[in-house]
Image (spheres, rainbow, N blue to C red):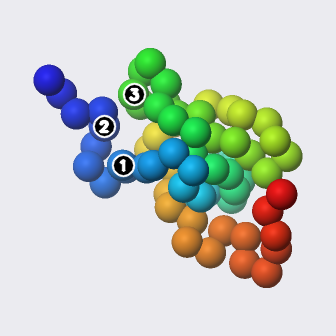
Amino acid sequence: MASNGPADTAFREGEEVVLAKGSYQGTLGVFVGLKKDINWADIKERNGSIRSHPVEWLAPSTAAIRGEQQQ
């Protein structure tokens, strides 16, 4: 069976991510999971909205909320 996506885009549920590409570049969020189309993923954005974005736009965010507390 094929893998769930490219090896370099293996995110885990709850991992902080940032949109590194696209029209919403810089948006911070938490990885929720892949969609049925494995090229798309849901992220929970900081305002609480859950939105779908192309997986290729996501990047790990090791310092996503430096100096701020998440709620």
Q: Secondary structure at mark 2?
A: loop
Amino acid type, mark 2: Gly
Q: Is residue 34 above or below residue 55?
A: above
Q: Which residue is mark 1?
A: 10
Q: Which residue is mark 3?
A: 38
At x 36%, y 49%, the residue is 10
Where's residue 61, x and y in %? 57, 65
Contact, CB < 8 Å: mark 1 with mark 2? yes
SS for callout 1: loop
The reply to whether residue 38 is visible in this rendering is yes
Q: Quadrant of the C terminus?
A: bottom right
At label 3, counting other C-alpha atoms closer than 10 Å, the crowd grade (few under 14, some 14-19, many 20 or more) is some
Which quadrant would the N terminus be assigned to in this image? top left
Seen as rendered, the residue at the extreme top is 36
Measured as percent of width and height from the top left, residue 19 is found at 60, 52
Q: Which mark is residue 41?
A: none
- Is 36 on the left or on the right of 69, as rendered? left
Q: Of marks 1 and 3, which one's residue comes earlier in the chain?
A: 1
Query: In the rendered structure, which disc, 3 or 2, sits on the residue that comes first in sequence?
Result: 2
Question: Dot 3 lies on which element?
Answer: loop
Say what amino acid the circle numbered 1 marks.
Ala
Q: Is residue 35 above or below residue 21?
A: above
- Residue 53 seen in render: no
Does the CB distance between marks 3 and 2 fall below 8 Å? yes
Residue visible at 26% across and 49% down in the picture: 7
| Residue denoted by label 2 | 5
Question: Which residue does the image show at 67% across and 51% down from the upper left?
Answer: 29
Q: Residues within 10 Å of mark 1 (few under 14, many from 20)?
A: few
